[in-house]
């Protein structure tokens, strides 16, 4: 995809896409059993977002927190990321933790901060941290670091946060650790989280002043994201080969087996394990979250960590956006099959906005609708 294509995407980002003729009733799904749910349903984008927000309110979140989490999950779903609405497949996992409260800044300097999430979801703490890092870099930078700890759930698609930082003119870097689902090597017990990292880079606006779509790169250091495994289980699909282990330490393509006593693999063998270890240290130890060897289990401790770094490029170099775009264009034109990270997601999001609907696995949509109507099972 060309730079003009990515700029054109920015024009469409805020456009409403709901279609009344495509609306799906709550009752039709609420009365269905899991076994009879359609494989995939096409749901108007605004309805997917509002229904998810309603479901989150029904399980205990206030209106603003529910709306923000729904926005983040729907954004991930728009671009085909597996950190999206699959989180609502087991809505009890998204319910407020006992004693949860709003995130607060507990330590702060002009260019750094640590946020105690107070057992709020990773998504809420991550938005607060990304915004604070971008603000500090802008006013006191050129570099700032903001960490979070004591979050109770995943922050989802990290690209959402670094893109948010890049739209404010900062290079954004995000690292996140999580409970142990990933083994460092075949036959080992899970020690790492899926430990993703992401980078967002501001690019120059178009000749007519049209805001550009930032370059983003977002990857798990595991061979597959946890919610990719959960999504495969929800869809009844096999996992790709060589991304997960069963209880016996051998490769498995059965998502249920990987989740029940097995483990996810790191990507790229020892190199992926090394990157995952670095994220564990920088997002876990540095943030003050639960770390291996200092707690019985990161899952039980429920203190997930993030580290956000914001860099104002103008404090280091002139014309950074143009220099970054020059590199991207050179790489893009270096071969017929070369694809820049993030372009496929941008294209998917554009296509779905133009269609006005999201394809959602039937079981996941059924779970969202039933939760929006009834809340959690008693």
Image (spheres, rainbow, N blue to C red):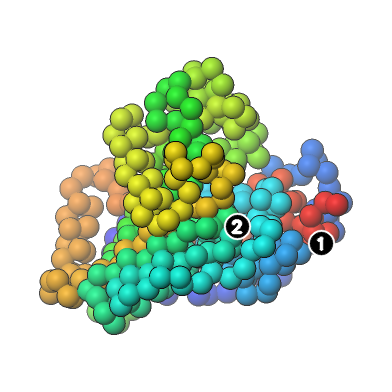
Where's residue 176, x and y in %?
42, 52
Give the total number of marks visible in the rendering: 2
Where's residue 211, x and y in %?
34, 76
Please state if 325 lies on the left or on the right of 5 as rendered: left
**Residue 1 lies in quadrant:** bottom left
Tell me which residue sits at (76%, 64%) in the image: 58
Tell me which residue sits at (53%, 64%) in the image: 117
Q: Secondary structure at mark 2?
A: strand
Against 360, residue 136 (above or below) is: below
Where's residue 360, x and y in %?
64, 51
> Camera-side residue: 234 or 42?
234
Q: Looking at the image, is mark 2 or mark 1 nearer the viewer?
A: 1
> Camera-side residue: 341 or 258?
258
Where's residue 33, x and y in %?
83, 44
**Residue 107 lies in quadrant:** bottom left
Please state if 290 lies on the left or on the right of 321 as rendered: right
Between discs 2 and 1, the one toward the N terminus = 2
**What label does residue 373 carry, if any?**
1
Tell me which residue sits at (67%, 74%) in the image: 63
Residue 329 can be seen in this image? yes
Q: Secondary structure at mark 1?
A: helix
Report crowding for label 2: few under 14, some 14 to 19, many 20 or more residues within 10 A (C-alpha): many
Please state if 234 lies on the left or on the right of 309 as rendered: right
> Camera-side residue: 27 or 141?
141
**What label does residue 358 carry, if any?**
2
Report crowding for label 1: few under 14, some 14 to 19, many 20 or more residues within 10 A (C-alpha): some
> Camera-side residue: 168 or 62?
62
Label 2 to label 1, Cα distance in Å?
A: 20 Å
Residue 216 can be seen in this image? no
Tell me which residue sits at (51%, 30%) in the image: 263
């Amino acid at each position: 995809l060309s730079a003009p294509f990515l700029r054109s995407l920015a024009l469409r980002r805020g456009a409403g896409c709901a279609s009344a003729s495509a609306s799906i009733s709550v009752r039709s799904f609420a009365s269905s059993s899991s076994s009879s749910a359609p494989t995939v349903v096409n749901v108007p984008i605004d309805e997917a977002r509002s229904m998810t927000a309603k479901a989150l309110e029904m399980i205990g979140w206030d209106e603003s927190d529910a709306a923000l989490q729904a926005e983040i999950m729907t954004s991930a779903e728009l671009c085909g990321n597996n950190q999206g609405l699959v989180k609502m497949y087991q809505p009890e996992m998204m319910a407020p933790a006992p004693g949860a409260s709003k995130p607060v800044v507990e330590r702060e300097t002009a260019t750094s901060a640590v946020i105690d999430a107070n057992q709020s979801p990773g998504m809420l703490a991550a938005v607060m941290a990304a915004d604070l890092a971008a603000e500090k870099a802008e006013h006191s930078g050129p570099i700032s670091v903001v960490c979070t700890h004591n979050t109770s759930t995943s922050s989802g698609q990290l690209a959402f946060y670094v893109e948010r930082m890049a739209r404010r003119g900062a290079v954004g870097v995000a690292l996140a650790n999580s409970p142990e689902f990933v083994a460092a090597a075949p036959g080992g017990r899970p020690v790492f989280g899926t430990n993703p990292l992401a980078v967002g880079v501001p690019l120059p606006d178009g000749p007519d002043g049209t805001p550009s779509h930032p370059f983003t790169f977002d990857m798990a250091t595991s061979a597959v994201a946890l919610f990719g495994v959960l999504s495969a289980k929800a869809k009844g699909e096999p996992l790709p080969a060589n991304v997960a282990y069963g209880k016996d330490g051998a490769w498995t393509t059965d998502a249920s087996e990987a989740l029940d006593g097995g483990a996810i693999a790191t990507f790229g063998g020892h190199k992926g394990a090394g990157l995952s270890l670095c994220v564990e240290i920088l997002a876990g130890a540095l943030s003050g979250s639960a770390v291996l060897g200092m707690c019985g289990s990161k899952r039980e401790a429920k203190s997930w960590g993030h580290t956000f770094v914001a860099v104002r490029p103008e404090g280091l170099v002139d014309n950074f956006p143009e220099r970054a775009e020059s590199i991207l264009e050179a790489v893009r034109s270096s071969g017929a099959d070369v694809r820049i990270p993030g372009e496929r997601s941008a294209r998917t999001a554009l296509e779905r906005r133009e269609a006005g609907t999201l394809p959602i696995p039937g079981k996941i949509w059924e779970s969202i609708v039933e939760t929006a109507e009834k809340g959690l099972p008693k």
